[in-house]
Amino acid sequence: MTHTATPFPDGFLWGASTAGHQIEGNNVNSDWWRREHDPAAKIEVPSLDACDSYHRWEQDMDLLAELGFTDYRFGIEWARIEPERGFFSRAEIAHYRRMVDGALARGLRPMVTLHHFTVPRWFEDLGGWTADGAVQAFTRYVEACAPIIADGVRHVCTINEPNVIAILAAGARTGDQPWPTAGGTVTPDEETTHALIAAHRAAVGAVRTVNSEIKVGWTVANQVYQALSGAEDATVAYTHPREDVFIEAARGDDFIGVQSYTRTRIGPDGPVPAPADAERTLTGWEYYPAAVGHALRHTADVIGDGTPLIVTENGIATADDTRRIDYYAAALDQVAAAIEDGIDVQGYLAWSALDNYEWGTYKSTFGLIAVDPSTFERTAKPSAVWLGGLGRTRELPRTAS
Ligand code: IFM
C-alpha cells in the first residue's frame, strides 16, 4: 500500500521506549540484579552499568528531541523508590520528577511505565505477585509515585507485558524456559495472571485519583499467533491465556499498549518453528515486520469496546541498521493501513531508543542509538535519523519491500 498524505492523526505520539533496568545501570536493589549474580540462574551477563542512563538521561532526551521524536516512554524503578518495604526515597522520587520535567522542557511528552519486569528484592522475598498483600504493596508504591506523575505526564503504563510476567512465573516454577521467546510453550501461571489483573485495576484507580486527566493503561505482549490450516480452534485456545485474557482486562482503560516483534505459527499440537528459509533477527525471531498490523487488529478485535491503541513497543534486534529501517518502514505501513481501516491507533513508540540490556545479553541490539559499552558515548544510527525525521513530517516516505 502507498500512502501519499499523512495517515497519522493530530496529536499522534511519535516516540521511542526504554525501561529503567535495561538502561539505568546499578539497579542493585531489584530482583533482577540479584538473579543476574546468582550462578544457578545461568544468566549470560549481568546488567551492571547498562547504558548509565540513570546519570545520562539528559543526553538521551536531548538526542531524541533533536532527532524529531515528540514522545519518550521510560520506566521508573520500584526498587529505587521503595528500597525497603514501606520506606520511600524522596531523593529517587525527585530524580524521576526531574526526568519528567526534563522531557517536558525538551518538548518530549513523557509516558511513564510504573513496572517493567523488575521488583524490589523485599517484594520477591515476600513471595512476589501471588503473596498476600502484593496488590496492596503495588498500590502503595503507585500512590507514592504521585509527585512524579501528577503534572505534565499524559500517559502512564501500569504493568509492562503482564502476560510475559505470568509466563516467567510459570517457567520459574518448572525450571523451564528462562525467557518466553516466540514459539515458547509455557502456559502463564494462572494465579499470577489474576494477581496482575487485580494489581492493574488497583493501579488504574490510584493513578486516576492522582490526576484524572492522565491516560492510564497497560502494555501487552502480542505474539501474533497464526493458525496453520486445521489449527484454528487450537490457536484460539492457545492464545486466550497467553494474550487475550490480558487484553480483555484492559476494557475501560484509557488506552492499551500493543507490543509486537514477530509471529508465532500454531499447528494442532502447538507452536511450529518458523519456515526453514525465514530470515532471523539477533534474538532468533523470524523477521516479520507485518506483526504490528496483526497485533493491532487482533487487539482491537478482542477488546471490542473501541479502547484506543498505542504501539508502545515495536522493533528489531539487528546489527544491520539498513534492515532496521526496512523493518520500521514495513511496520509503519501496517500501522497506517490499520488507521485507514478505522482502528483508533494513537501513537507509535519504537523499541528501543538505545542499545540496551536485553535481559541477559547486550548482543541483541534493538537500539536506534548505539551506546559505547566503555565510554557510554551515544551515537544515533541512520535508523534514528530516519524514524525521528518522520516525527517532523508525519509522512511515510516510501513503502518498504
Ligand atoms: O526488551 C524487551 C522489553 O523489555 C519488553 N518487550 C520486548 C523487548 C524485546 O525483547
Image (cartoon, rainbow, N blue to C red):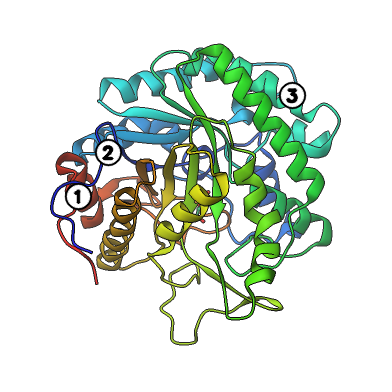
Find residue 385 and name its label: 1
Distance Cα–Cα, label 3 vs label 1: 42 Å
Q: Is residue 320 above or below residue 248?
A: below
Distance Cα–Cα, label 2 vs label 3: 34 Å
Crowding at mark 1 (Cα within 10 Å: few <14, some 14-19, many 20+): some
Label 3 sits on a secondary structure element that is helix
Q: Which residue is mark 3?
A: 137
Q: Residue at x 45, y 32 (%)?
A: 54
Distance Cα–Cα, label 1 vs label 2: 9 Å
Quadrant location, the N terminus: bottom left
| Amino acid at circle 2 | Leu
In the image: residue 338, left or right of residue 259: left
Q: Nearer the viewer, residue 31 or 257?
A: 257
Q: Residue at x 40, y 58 (%)?
A: 293
Instruction: Return the residue found at the far right.
Output: 132
| Amino acid at circle 3 | Ala
Question: Label 2 CB, ligand 1: below 8 Å?
Answer: no
Q: Position of residue 283 (x, y in %)?
A: 49, 67
Comes first in the chain, label 1 or label 2:
2
Q: Residue at x 22, y 45 (%)?
A: 388
Find residue 335 and name its label: none
In the image: residue 336, left or right of residue 274: left
Find residue 64 and name its label: 2
Q: Position of residue 244 (x, y in %)?
A: 63, 51
How many numbered marks does the figure carry? 3
